[in-house]
Amino acid sequence: MQGATASDLDAAENHTGYRWPDEVRELFRLQSDSIEIVPMFRLLSLDEAITTWDMWMQINDDLRERWPEGSAPDESAIRAAPAGSPAEVFVPELIPIADDAAGTSLCVDTRGGLLHGCVAEYSASAGGSRPLWSSVSAMVADVVDAIRVRGTFQGEWTPTICLGRVSSSTVLTIR
């Protein structure tokens, strides 16, 4: 199964309103099957990424209405902050690339600054975002290095490789 086309990626970027880093476009261009690259986090297809982005935007709209007047986080300040800065609420500049199906997404932060393109973990219930890797390629390299030396990455995860087949697709799970 083929990943996203250039026109699919252009449409997705237009939907979010942000130019994505080239390696994010490449990630969606190359993959379309279910791959759990970080324990508990399954890489999203392009369509799933847009659906997840829309979901987070809707959650933000719903939450914004519930904040007592004057207590909501300053979304414009969060959006103006450099990439990798904490985001107490989901901002459109966060592009989901993986999801744990329990309310946390790995997102590429497209805000400006030195960490533009970093991979951040975002969870509304955990209070926002925190950067984990400087880029998608750094995330992949971290996982590969941990597999190679049978060590941990991010100080908590030990990868194991489980190959399996689901229908006609090969599934790679790294736990």
Image: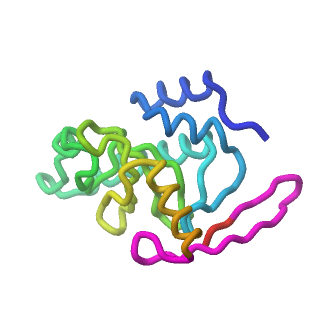
Whether residue 170 is in magenta: the answer is yes
- Total count of labels: 0
Quadrant for the N terminus in the image: top right
**Residue span colored magenta:** 150-172
Query: As displayed, is residue 133 above or below residue 2?
Result: below
Q: Position of residue 149 (x, y in %)?
A: 54, 73
- At 41% from the left and 70% from the top, the residue drawn is 154
Indicate left or right for 91 with 147 as reference.
left
Query: As displayed, is residue 30 above or below residue 172?
Result: above
- At 35% from the left and 46% from the top, the residue drawn is 61
- Which residue lies most toward the right here? 168
Indicate left or right for 148 with 94 as reference.
right
Q: Quadrant of residue 167?
A: bottom right
Q: Position of residue 43 (x, y in %)?
A: 59, 54
Whether residue 103 is in magenta: the answer is no
Which one is in front, 144 or 25?
144
Q: Position of residue 10 (x, y in %)?
A: 54, 24
Query: As displayed, is residue 37 above or below residue 47?
Result: below
- Which residue lies most toward the left here? 70
- At 60% from the left and 39% from the top, the residue drawn is 28
- At 27% from the left and 53% from the top, the residue drawn is 87
Q: Position of residue 4 (x, y in %)?
A: 66, 33
